[in-house]
């Protein structure tokens, strides 16, 4: 900005004029112009007198919005538009529309353009030109984790099933511990860029150290994702056929569920600062297609805090509690387990918790897990870390927590952080060490 008593710099003066014209253009004052703009220099008084007369003209408003495409109904695409005809023009809103349509997955390219030459009565038509994406997307992958062992994954995403923009996604994953097949049917909501409805069917088969569970689940949910928040309300029915230790059975539950997630971060792969918070509530009633009354609360927290340019502090915490009269009626999929790559390192996957007479970990009503870690970036995309984890799954909330300590190395790869950790279970006889290998984001 130009202020009295400050030194006059001609480039600053020209910059202010350019910013004024740019702001007018952004806000729809397409005919804005300078009627007068001059500077009178008085050498004897060492002053500069600035004379500027700026005529913004009349602000343009949005006219008709036309979508140049033939794969979707215009009614759906109009729901992406963040403005109404007759409102004042703003280039930021056009950018929002272009980003939203680009992120929808329907199109490979999108261009939103004002048609200034076709303006009438200060209303500018808007044309959206787009190219359709490939209708089907196929993905395949292989991987390995110390929790799941070797795994293969295949998925198909049908980007639009019909002209109303419904989507169909199918996924199959096979691993040494758990295999899953699932189908999601997605229906755009009133504001498709932030809310949608989802129908899901899945089946899974899990076999892990004395825990055998076959799960069938059907569900429907309403999801809203806006800015840093994500909210999901859902209802699902599940049937479990399980054997765990000395117990076996079949159960079914109809579970209303609500979850909230908040996340903020300065990046996606290489995060230096951010945190996330998760809350999930579940319930069931014996009178409504359920074998028992049930109530459950789960909390999760993660944070990445920069201490110096190269040093970060990472914290993680999980807590959970479940009410049910007869614990034996609770299937393994609804019990809490601890131990593993993303829980208490130093212990095997889901092998930390109450045991039965056979020594099989049977899970608990309660969960408490926490982790503290410091890492140091010694080279671009490379870090070393020291950490300690503590936690347990419990039948009663006052049972002893188990701790581990360890160190590791991280590589920030193009597909996420690859972590190799060596952890020692210091509360176990012999204080054994365990290797952990994981791939995924820090939050």
Image (cartoon, rainbow, N blue to C red):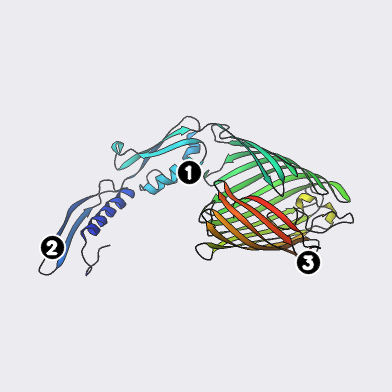
Residue at figure coordinates x 75%, y 54% from the top left: 348
Residue at figure coordinates x 29%, y 54% from the top left: 19
Does label 1 or label 2 sit earlier along the sequence? 2
**Which SS class for mark 3?**
loop
Residue at figure coordinates x 76%, y 49% from the top left: 333
- Image coordinates for residue 15, horizontal then vertical, percent: 26, 56
**Distance between the alpha carbons at the discs numbered 2 and 3:** 81 Å
Tag nearer the camera, 1 or 2:
2
Quadrant of the snapshot with the C terminus: bottom right
Tag nearer the camera, 1 or 3:
3
Labels 2 & 3 near each other (Cβ < 8 A)? no
Seen as rendered, the residue at the extreme top is 70
> With 2 as the anchor, is 126 left or right in this view?
right
Does label 1 or label 3 sit earlier along the sequence? 1
* Foreground pick, 177 / 404: 404
Which residue carries the number 2 mark?
A: 41
User: Residue 100, labelled with which disc?
Assistant: 1
Q: Residues within 10 Å of mark 2 (few under 14, many from 20)?
A: few
Number of marks in the rendered image: 3
**Which SS class for mark 1?**
helix
Above or below: residue 6 compared with residue 93: below
User: Residue 400, labelled with which disc?
Assistant: 3
- Image coordinates for residue 186, horizontal then vertical, percent: 60, 39
Quadrant of the snapshot with the N terminus: bottom left
Query: Is residue 83 at least partly visible in the picture?
Result: no
- Image coordinates for residue 234, horizontal then vertical, percent: 66, 48
Above or below: residue 17 compared with residue 170: below
């Amino acid at each position: 900005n130009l202020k009295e008593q400050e030194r006059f710099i001609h480039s600053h003066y020209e910059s202010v004029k350019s910013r004024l014209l740019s702001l007018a253009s952004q806000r729809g004052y397409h005919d804005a112009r300078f009627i007068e703009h001059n500077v009178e220099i008085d050498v004897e008084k060492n002053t500069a007198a600035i004379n500027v007369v700026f005529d913004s003209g009349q602000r343009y408003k949005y006219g008709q919005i036309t979508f140049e495409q033939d794969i979707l109904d215009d009614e759906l695409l109009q729901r992406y538009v963040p403005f109404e005809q007759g409102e004042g023009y703003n280039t930021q809103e056009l950018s929002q529309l272009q980003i939203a349509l680009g992120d929808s997955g329907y199109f490979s390219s999108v261009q939103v353009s004002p048609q200034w030459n076709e303006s009438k009565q200060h209303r500018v038509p808007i044309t959206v030109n787009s190219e359709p994406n490939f209708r089907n997307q196929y993905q395949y992958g292989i991987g390995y984790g110390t929790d799941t062992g070797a795994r293969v994954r295949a998925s198909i995403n049908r980007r639009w099933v019909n002209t109303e923009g419904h989507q169909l996604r199918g996924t199959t994953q096979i691993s040494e511990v758990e295999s899953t097949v699932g189908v999601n049917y997605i229906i755009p909501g009133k504001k498709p860029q932030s809310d949608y409805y989802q129908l899901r069917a899945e089946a899974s088969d899990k076999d892990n150290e004395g825990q055998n569970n076959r799960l069938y689940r059907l569900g429907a949910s309403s999801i809203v994702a806006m800015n840093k928040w994500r909210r999901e309300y859902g209802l699902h029915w599940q049937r479990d056929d399980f054997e765990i230790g000395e117990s076996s059975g079949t159960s079914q539950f109809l579970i209303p569920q609500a979850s909230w997630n908040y996340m903020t971060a300065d990046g996606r792969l290489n995060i230096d600062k951010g945190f996330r918070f998760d809350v999930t509530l579940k319930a069931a009633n014996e009178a409504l297609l359920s074998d028992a009354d049930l109530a459950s609360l789960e909390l999760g927290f993660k944070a990445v805090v920069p201490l110096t340019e190269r040093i970060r502090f990472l914290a993680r915490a999980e807590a959970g509690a479940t009410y049910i009269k007869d614990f034996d009626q609770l299937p393994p999929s609804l019990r809490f387990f601890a131990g593993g790559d993303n829980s208490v390192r130093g212990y095997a996957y889901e092998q930390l918790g109450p045991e039965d007479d056979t020594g099989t970990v049977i899970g608990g009503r309660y969960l408490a897990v926490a982790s503290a870690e410091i890492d140091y970036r010694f080279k671009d995309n490379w870090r070393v870390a020291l950490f300690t984890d503590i936690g347990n799954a419990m039948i009663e909330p006052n049972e002893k927590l188990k701790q581990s300590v360890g160190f590791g190395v991280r590589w920030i790869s193009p597909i996420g952080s690859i972590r190799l950790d060596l952890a020692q279970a210091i509360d176990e006889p012999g204080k054994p060490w365990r290797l952990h290998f994981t791939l995924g984001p820090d939050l």
